Amino acid sequence: MQLAGRRILIDPVFSSYASPIFFANRAFPGSNVYTAADIPDIDVLIMSHDHWDHLDYPTIMALKDKIKEIVCPLGVGEYFETWGFDTAHLHEEDWDTDIEVFPDFHVHVLPSQHFSGRLLKQNATQWASFAIVMPQRKVYYSGDSGYGAHFRTIGEQFGGFDLALMENGQYDRQWHRIHMLPDETAQAAADLQARYVLPAHNSKFSLARHKWQAPLQDLTAASRGAAWRLLTPEIGEKISLWSPNGGSEWWNRSV
């Protein structure tokens, strides 16, 4: 994203697998459009938690010289310290913390309903959602989260958002407490009082049994009649919050 002249990158993964094992959690065909070499200098890197499909060592190291500031929840900063990042530019904070990364550019670390862990070590680090707040705009990123009361609380706390980047994809009814179903994503967007919603987490890695296009199809259906507008840009398509075109149902071309 580019907001108030600042470039923000969230949970980048340019690898073909979301796992330490090369054949597990594969990327969907056609989803690896970009590499780290395509990414410009980044003012703020936001990391939601330490799962392999969000915190990817090869990607982070390829971007290392381009990253100015890092915002992450408690414990996640230890990875960046171990990987040689300058701790003076590392903002590692607990839930409900307001970080003024730049003048008039705040990132709030907020609750989410998920878990963390790599290999055998579970829940040693925190997971989070985020609000990016500037005088002109307010943007929310859900991180990975099941549906919960925190969405309504956050919506009331910030008085709504111009844009909500919402987890929508890689879900199953047996574990919807940690990943929302599309109708729950729609309800969470309403709770947040979002004006526009851009789905995330839906078209990169195959972590669930549903077809890759199902999250976009189902959220589109759940969005009909909503108070907010759904934005569905194709991979690489630009969207402007000043005059969003919404995107097309591009995923149906591959059904």
Image (cartoon, helix red, strand yellow):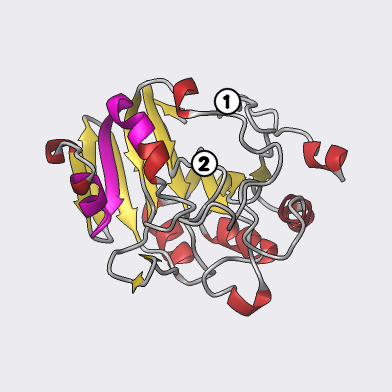
Instruction: Look at the picture and state if 124 lies above or below 108.
Output: below
Where's residue 144, x and y in %? 49, 59
Instruction: Look at the picture and state if 38 lies above or below 228.
Output: above
Horizontally, residue 184 falls left or right of residue 125, namely right
The residue located at (36%, 48%) in the rendering is 47
The residue lying toward the viewer, choosing from 223 and 68, is: 68
Q: Quadrant of residue 170?
A: bottom right
Please tell me how crowded label 1 is: few (under 14), some (14-19), or many (20+) other residues with Cα within 10 Å: few
Q: Is residue 134 visible in the rendered structure shown here?
A: no
Q: Secondary structure at mark 2?
A: loop
The numbered dot on residue 6 is: none
Instruction: Look at the picture and state if 214 lies above or below 237.
Output: below
For mark 1, what is the residue?
240
For mark 2, what is the residue?
15
Instruction: Look at the picture and state if 174 lies above or below 51.
Output: below
The residue lying toward the viewer, choosing from 55 and 71, is: 55
